[in-house]
Amino acid sequence: MILISACLVGKNVRYDGGNKLNDKLKKLVDDGYAKSICPEILGGLTTPREPAEIVNGDGFDVWNHQAKVVTISGEDVTEQYKVGALETLNICKRLGCDTLILKADSPSCGSQKIYSGDFNGTKKEGSGVLTALLTLHNIKVEDETNYSLLLDERRAADHSEQKTSNK
Ligand code: SF4
């Protein structure tokens, strides 16, 4: 089972009340091949909500108590981000999910870059809070820019399993 960021499959869960629909990823969910999750909603945050960024590091630093997630008006929402990430990890384990396709650049879901923490539109290298937790549990994270290879690998594995079971 694959889990996908809910905003990528058209659910209006982003901080601004919108989504980032990717038709190919939505089809994976519609066809029963994947399910969607939003860690920030699972953590108790609402839509719309204030934008938030990780200050003083990235998701790994949040779990090491060296960085915080803070909204643009200065509210500390670190706890909600951690609760949502832990709940997503639980769901992932329950479903036997070994890979997630998560929205790039998000303070929860980002896996290559995240926003800098200065609320000025710049990005820095690093992972979001959820991605860091999943990585610490050896669960693979891709984003909407690099997931195609993963699906090709899955199809090849399914195909070879089918061939073996047909022998
Ligand atoms: S990027 Fe992740 S946390 Fe943000 S809206 Fe999408 S699914 Fe939710």
Image (cartoon, grey):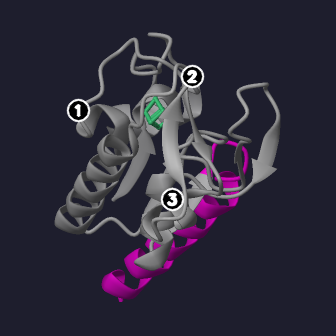
Q: Nearer the viewer, mark 3 or mark 2?
A: 2
Position of residue 69 measured from the top left corner of the image (x, y, whole percent):
49, 43
Three-letter code, disc 3: Thr
Q: Residue at left 44%, top 55%?
A: 130
In depth, the one of 2 and 151 nearer the eye is: 2
**Magenta stretch?**
143-167
Between the C-alphas of marks 1 and 2, the distance is 18 Å
Q: Residue furthest front?
A: 74
Q: Earlier in the sequence, mark 1 or mark 3?
A: 1
In depth, the one of 54 and 143 nearer the eye is: 54
Three-letter code, disc 2: Ile
Query: In the figure, 98 relative to 119: above or below?
Result: below
Q: Is residue 102 left or right of residue 127?
A: left
- The quadrant of the image that shows the C terminus is bottom left
Query: In the figure, 37 relative to 98: above or below?
Result: above
Q: Main secondary structure of the magenta part?
A: helix
Secondary structure type for disc 2: loop
For disc 2, the marked residue is 72
Query: In the figure, 59 relative to 33: above or below?
Result: below
For disc 3, the marked residue is 131
For label 2, being within 8 Å of ligand 1 is answered no
Q: Is residue 2 left or right of residue 86?
A: right
For disc 1, the marked residue is 44
Between the C-alphas of marks 3 and 2, the distance is 22 Å
Q: Residue at left 36%, top 36%?
A: 40
Indicate whether residue 115 is drawn in magenta.
Answer: no
